[in-house]
């Protein structure tokens, strides 16, 4: 169940929220999630990146009747975003747009592009920040695309932490272990940049790494040990 509300106060990790409607909580657990929205105006970088992705989609000739038509592509994805998020409109203008919607909209465009092999003119790792960058890294892992160059051939799972000589990559429990999708060339580059190390490699390419879950493990045939549920 999702309920809107207003943030009244915040002290460290303790927040006070006034819900917009009365809610009968007797049938729900005490565990809740909070989504914070950044209502500041959309940035010029966000707007340019969103339009660049849509132009790439239009050039890719994927969209059937709207292939090659930038405006038709824009109208389609704005309408889809509004439908998926129960909104009346989606704006990329400075006056009406906000940063949260812009980031979510860009993430939707990137997911579509990765799923349909759209060649991107601007690399997302140079455009995204925070959780949205990590979401892109996750999508790259699921779609087997190099997170650095966008290549789709020879994609390998790359570890974001040194494993050590005493641990077997084949037998180790990968569940929760951070990783990323890299093409063969970038994986070799990561493994042999001893003057950098993995941490410097990650910082250079603005990468954060994604903890392995069951979906990632299945795609890359990684060994995992599931935790037994307590009865």
Image (cartoon, helix red, strand yellow):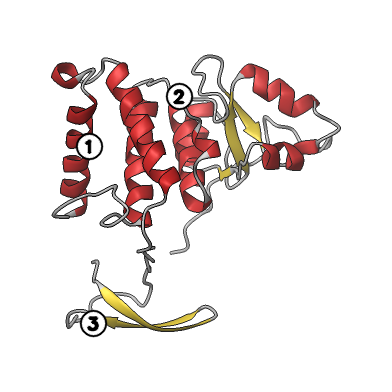
| Residue 109 showing in the rendered view | yes
Residue 163: % across, % down: 76, 38
Q: Earlier in the sequence, mark 3 or mark 1?
A: 3
Callout 2 crowding tier (Cα within 10 Å): few <14, some 14–19, many ≥20: few
In the image, residue 176 sits, relative to residue 196, either above or below, namely below
Q: How many marks?
A: 3
Q: Earlier in the sequence, mark 2 or mark 3?
A: 3
Q: Nearer the viewer, mark 2 or mark 3?
A: 2
Q: Residue drawn at (42%, 20%), measured in percent from left and top? A: 119
Q: Nearer the viewer, mark 3 or mark 1?
A: 1
Residue 129: % across, % down: 52, 49
Q: Which mark is residue 77?
A: 1
Seen from the viewer's position, the closer of residues 160 and 98 is 98
Q: Is residue 138 left or right of residue 99?
A: right
Q: Residue drawn at (52%, 35%), measured in percent from left and top? A: 217
Q: Earlier in the sequence, mark 2 or mark 1?
A: 1
Residue 35: % across, % down: 37, 65
In the image, residue 124 sits, relative to residue 89, either above or below, namely above
């Amino acid at each position: 169940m999702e309920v809107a509300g207003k943030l009244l106060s915040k002290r460290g990790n303790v927040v006070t929220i006034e819900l917009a409607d009365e809610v009968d909580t007797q049938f729900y657990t005490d565990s809740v999630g909070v989504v914070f929205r950044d209502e500041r105006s959309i940035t010029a970088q966000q707007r340019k990146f969103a339009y660049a992705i849509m132009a790439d989609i239009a050039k890719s000739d994927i969209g059937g009747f709207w292939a090659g038509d930038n405006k038709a592509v824009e109208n389609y994805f704005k309408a889809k975003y509004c439908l998926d998020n129960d909104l009346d409109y989606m704006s990329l203008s400075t006056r009406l747009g906000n940063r949260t919607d812009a980031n979510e909209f860009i993430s939707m465009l990137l997911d579509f592009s990765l799923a349909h092999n759209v060649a991107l003119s601007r690399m997302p790792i140079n455009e995204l920040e925070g959780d949205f960058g990590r979401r892109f890294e996750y999508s790259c892992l699921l779609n087997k695309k190099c997170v650095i160059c966008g290549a789709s051939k020879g994609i390998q799972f790359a570890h974001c932490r040194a494993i050590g000589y005493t641990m077997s990559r084949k037998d180790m429990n990968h569940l929760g272990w951070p990783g990323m999708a890299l093409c063969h060339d970038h994986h070799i580059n990561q493994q042999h940049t001893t003057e950098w190390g993995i941490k410097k490699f990650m910082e250079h390419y603005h990468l954060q790494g994604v903890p392995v879950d069951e979906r990632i493990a299945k795609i890359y045939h990684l060994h995992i040990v599931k935790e037994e549920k307590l009865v």
